[in-house]
Image (spheres, rainbow, N blue to C red):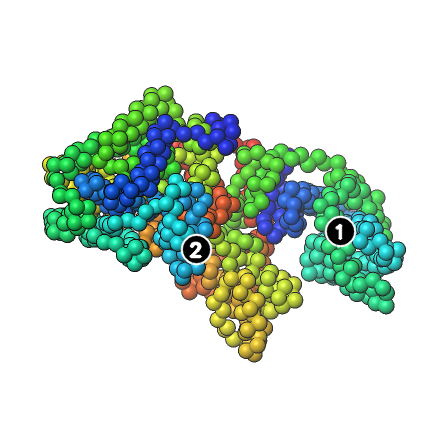
Amino acid sequence: MNTAATDTEDVQKEESMILQKAMISANYDALSTAHEEGKKISSTFVPGNLNELLMCFDFVRNLPEINALQAGMRKKSGGYIMEAERSGHSEDVCTYVKSDLGMMSKGQVGPNGKPLPTPDLLLLSYTGCFTFMKWFELVRDQYDCETAMLHVPYQADGKITENMRHFVVTQLKEHVIPTLERVSGIKFDIDRLREYLRESAKAEDDLVWVLQSAKNRPSPIDAYFGGVYYCGPIFTAFRGTRETTDYYKSLRVEVEDRLAKGLGPVTPEGTLDEERIRLVVEGPPNWTHFRDFWKMFYDEGVVVVASSYTKVGGVYDFGFRHDPDNPLETLADYCLGCYTNHSLPSRVDMLCNYMDEYQADGFLVNSIKSCNSFSAGQLLMLREIEERTGKPAGFIETDLVDPRYFSSANVKNRLESYFQMIEQKKARGQDRTAA
Amino acid sequence: MKCFIGIDLGSTTTKAIVLDEQQTVLGRGITNSRSNYGIAADVAKQEAFLDARFFLFRKLLHDLPALTGHVDDFLENLEQDFRLQQYLDQLDDLRRTCIDSASDDRLAADGPETRELLTELFRQLGAEAVNLFGPGSSRKSDFFRDIAGSQYSKASRSVTEGSNIRFESMLNIYDRSIIDVENRITNDTDEAMFMGALERTCKRSDNFSQLKDELRAPMKTVLDTELEEAYVIGTGYGRATLPFSKEHIRSEILCHGLGAHIMHPETATVLDIGGQDTKAIQVDPHGIVESFQMNDRCAAGCGRYLGYIADEMNLGLHELGPMAMKSTRKVRINSTCTVFAGAELRDRLSMGEKREDIVSGLHRAIILRAMSILSRSGGIRDQFTFTGGVAKNEAAVAVLKELAEENYGALTMNVNPDSIYTGALGAATFAQRTMVH
């Protein structure tokens, strides 16, 4: 039995979630008033974002994927997507892109209901998603603003070489930083960058502790649905700030408390008291039906103990931390190490490691219909992980922010079948052990 | 007698299986899922219990020396008479409901005439009923809605000729009434129905008439046997709508996997093509599901596709397979979209293609889609078991066998005559295991 929220509309939240909401809200307000206050705005993407570097030039940071995600959660993305399709964008194009373009066409109102000003700079750190490039091409065409592009070599062989690092650092020195200086009118101060990086590393320590708390039974967190909240500040406009360090400190205290009390994760429906199944999940969640989707897991006592999606904005749990002593090199390593920049074999290794380390009962892929970049190869990964771990794997398909591609009944049907399959296999394993 | 029941609520049909403690299948029941899964589950279960009584009766009749060599003949007659009685009872219910419906305000002006026509129409339907359930009879469907609907439509045309009542008005009355009739569970007791059928069968033949008293005793024994519902498990598309607690519900994936294993213990891969789902399931040597894949978001290439094609061609669903088997030329159809299928069909006909070749091409198209789902699930392993409503279609079976061997080499492909009950059998087995273990 799980402790359901007494009123289904009364969503249960952790303190840290409330704190994060305030941070996000403040950032949207800062974006709304940036130009009035004489500040510049940079748009940039989550994977490989150079937040600390942008802060050195006082840019207010705008993250288009987060805007699309917010639009999805606030049930606005459907209208934006249709607007983009009316302008000629195909049904198969990434729905983050279409949501963003649709939002621009419909008056560019941000999730806070206030106008989102035109960015002064598009900073594109390319870490494996080809669509990002096309996205910013379209945005640049619309805004006619400056673009800084950082080419990050793909980790095809599963390791970062000195050449790769050097290539990224050179671009930072010769192209990215000069562009940021020119657009912002502020001179680069490497010590300021070091300070921010020092804060980042502190927050990263606490984030890793929180994510790894899921190794306990019961897990005090859900590392997928809850995980997206935990990663929010560090993956977006806040990494390197003092408030982010404080956020993760507070989150860690919260999780430590839950762990000490032997409590399960907080979900919108209430605390998950009985952990029946532990999963590792690959792929982003669906945002338009986020709560319904999570409830499908909650209802069956399923907790996600590790996920790849919480690594797209940085992989920290294998030791990497931003290093203030090597500021540009560490930015290069961060970009090179993002999950999106990993080859399929590296991803499989990482996920197998999670299956083992977090004692998962199964591996689930939520494949994104409109994401051609990352859906390719997921079935092969699934087979490989299934074979290597001997644990049952499941596969469902939804979408990021296109509500038309979330069929509740079908997703629920497949998930229930998958969960029952895991339980059946577990029961059989127990029978064998008993025999 | 303790009975374990599995109910599979499919999008098109609802199936039930009754097992005893030794996992012997006592009875099978099937009905159309209509728009009311609760009723469909009750009807299917009731049918399965009736079938169980026939099964038990058959066992006792084998001990009756006077009937030696005639048991099958007798039971065939008895079942026909039973079904006839069932049909007549429902027909009477339909008659009353239609007449009530004809008194509807909108039809008040024509009410008396309409009621007269209905009385005549149902007299004709009653008279024709014997032919539908007589020896050697064949029906396009076993569901009351389909049989009565087809007869009603034909009779409406003749009774409305020369009258002031339009044929369409009569059909409207039927459409309004059939849902109510379908959603009413008959109150007849098994005893009244069985004894009535026995009377009818004995009247039909002198041989059986002489044995009437001897036959009554075993029938009474069977009817007095309490069939106790020890445990019920529901599965299938509509399982969430059943008034069952969570412990009484299993996913259709698990049930089809286990059901296929019970039917064919060497099963390694299962393909189930149902009304709106295609499932590819890999099972271990104990029938435990190892992995599965299903069609997502779109039901293209599922059983409904064939139903739609049959409607477009004005054929019964069961006529499609035999027609496709007559094909002499391959016609490539790419679209498995149910909505596009009609357009594709008409286009091919206009190009002069033969109906049987087009229908054969349509069968190939859905099986190609199933092959893709099979690949995603891990391919086809020996033995391969094909289940679901589409497994009754000989053309679909032939194409599947050809493509399976072309892609995965020689293998044993099982198609059980009762494959439509695979999910219900798996559910009933889960029910039995839950109680026994």
User: Residue at the spot x=83%, y=67% of the render?
Assistant: B161
What SS does tag 1 mark?
A: helix
- The location of residue A283, given as percent across then percent down, is 35, 46
Tell me: B135 left or right of A15.
right
User: Residue at the spot x=54%, y=78% of the render?
Assistant: B351
- Closer to us: mark 1 or mark 2? 2
User: In the image, is residue B288 above or below residue A11?
Assistant: below
| Amino acid type for the residue under numbered disc 2 | Glu
Tell me: B126 left or right of A357.
right
Q: Quadrant of the N terminus of chain B?
A: top right
- The location of residue B321, given as percent across then percent down, is 59, 65
Viewer-side residue, B348 vs A97: A97
Residue A207 in view (yes/no) = yes
- Report which residue position mark 2 lands on: A83
- The location of residue A254, given as percent across then percent down, is 33, 25
| Amino acid type for the residue under numbered disc 1 | Ser
- The location of residue B301, given as percent across then percent down, is 51, 59
Q: Do the residues labelled 1 and 2 touch (CB within 8 Å)?
A: no
Q: Residue pushed farthest bottom?
A: B352
- Report which residue position mark 1 lands on: B177
